[in-house]
Amino acid sequence: MDAYFYIILVVGLVSTVICLGAGILKKAPNDTTILSVAAVELSLLVYLVGSIVRVAGGEQMAGEPWEFWGYLLTALLLPVGAVYWAILERTRWSNFVLAAVGVTALVMAARMNQIWY
Amino acid sequence: MTAKPSHEDIGTTAAPAAGAPVDAAPAAALAPANDTRNTGPGRLLIAVYAVFAISATARAGFQILTKFSEAPLAYLLSAFAAVVYLVATVSLAKSGRTWFKVSVAAVLVELVGVLVVGALSLFDSVNFPHETVWSLFGRGYAFIPLLLPILGLIWLYRRRPAPKKA
C-alpha cells in the first residue's frame, strides 16, 4: 500500500462518515457533504496524475495495466455521478448515495494498489 | 449549509434508523404516482445496484477475455450475474407496471442465484473453485450480494403498483 492509497483511505472514510452523518440527521445534500465527495475526487485525481508520472518515468506495474487504468477511470466517474444525482434529488437519501462513494473509492484504491505491486 | 428542508422528509415522524434505509420510506410524502421506485431510499438501492452492475460486468468481461478456459462455468455465471444486475438497475430506475414486474423478476433471480451459487460453492468446491460475485454468498463483497435482493424485495413490496382498476 502506498501513500496514494492512504490518502484515499483517510479522505474516503472522512467523506463517508460526513455523508452518513448528514443522512442520519435527515439533512439534504449540502456544501459540506458535496465538498467531502469532491475531496475524494481530488485525491483520485492526485492518484491519476501520480500514476501517469510514474509510468512516464519508466516504472512497470506488476499486474495488467489496462485493468489498473480501468479501475482508476471508473473510480473517477463515481463521485461525479453521485454528485450529479444528489443535485437532481435533494433528499437525505442522496447523502447515503454520496456516502457510498468514499468506501467504494477506498476499495477500488486498494485493488489498484494490488495490481500495481 | 442550506436551510431548505427536504420535502421528502416532511411526512416522516421519528424515522427509526439509518442502518435500515427501507424502514424510513416516507411513502405517503412521495410522488403522487405510486408507480415509481426511483426516489428516496430507492435511489440508494439503484446506486448500489449500479455499482454492482459495473463491477460485475467489468470482472466477468475480464475473466472471459483472459482466462475463460480455466473455469467456463464459473465465468459464465459471472457474466449471468452481471446481466442480472444490469437488468435490475435499469428496471428499478424506470417507472410503470411492466418495469415493476421486470424488477421483481430480476431481484428474484438474483436471490435464487446467490443462494444456489452460494450453497454450491460451499458444498461442491471442486466444480466451483473460481470466484464469482455470488460465491460463498457474496463473501468477497461483504455479503452485499446476499443483502441486496432482500432489501430490493422489501422496497419493491412497499412501492408495488396499486391494483388495477377494472
Image (tube, rainbow, N blue to C red):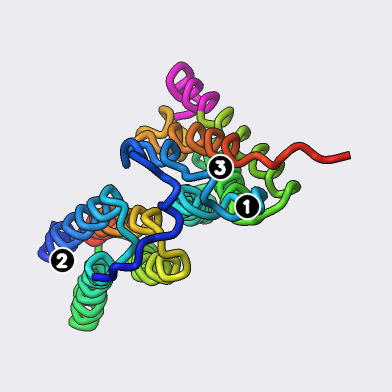
Residue beneath the point at 36% across and 62% down? B5
Q: Chain of mark 3?
A: B
Q: Which quadrant: the C terminus of chain B?
A: top right
**Residue sitting nearer the eye, A108 or A54:** A108
**Amino acid type at image mark 1:** Thr
Q: Residues within 10 Å of mark 3 (few under 14, many from 20)?
A: many
Look at the image and say whether residue B137 sits in the magenta stretch: no
Asked if A55 appears above or below A102 in the picture, the reply is below
Say yes or no: labels 2 and 1 on the same chain: no
Secondary structure category for the residue under label 1: loop
Q: In the picture provided, is B23 more to the left or to the right than A26?
A: right
Q: What span is in magenta? A: B115-131
For disc 1, the marked residue is: B36
Residue beneath the point at 31% across and 38% down? B17
Q: Residues within 10 Å of mark 1 (few under 14, many from 20)?
A: many
Are the residues flagged by discs 3 and 1 in contact, CB closer than 8 Å? no
Secondary structure category for the residue under label 3: helix
Image position, residue B99 (x, y; %): 70, 49
**Residue sitting nearer the eye, A79 or B142:** A79
Give the mark, 3 or 1, whose residue is nearer the N terminus. Answer: 1
For disc 3, the marked residue is: B81
**Amino acid type at image mark 3:** Ala
Q: In the picture provided, is B135 more to the left or to the right than A10?
A: right
Q: Which quadrant: the N terminus of chain B?
A: bottom left
Are the residues flagged by discs 2 and 1 in contact, CB closer than 8 Å? no
Q: Residues within 10 Å of mark 2 (few under 14, many from 20)?
A: some
How far apart are the alpha carbons under marks 2 and 1?
Answer: 41 Å
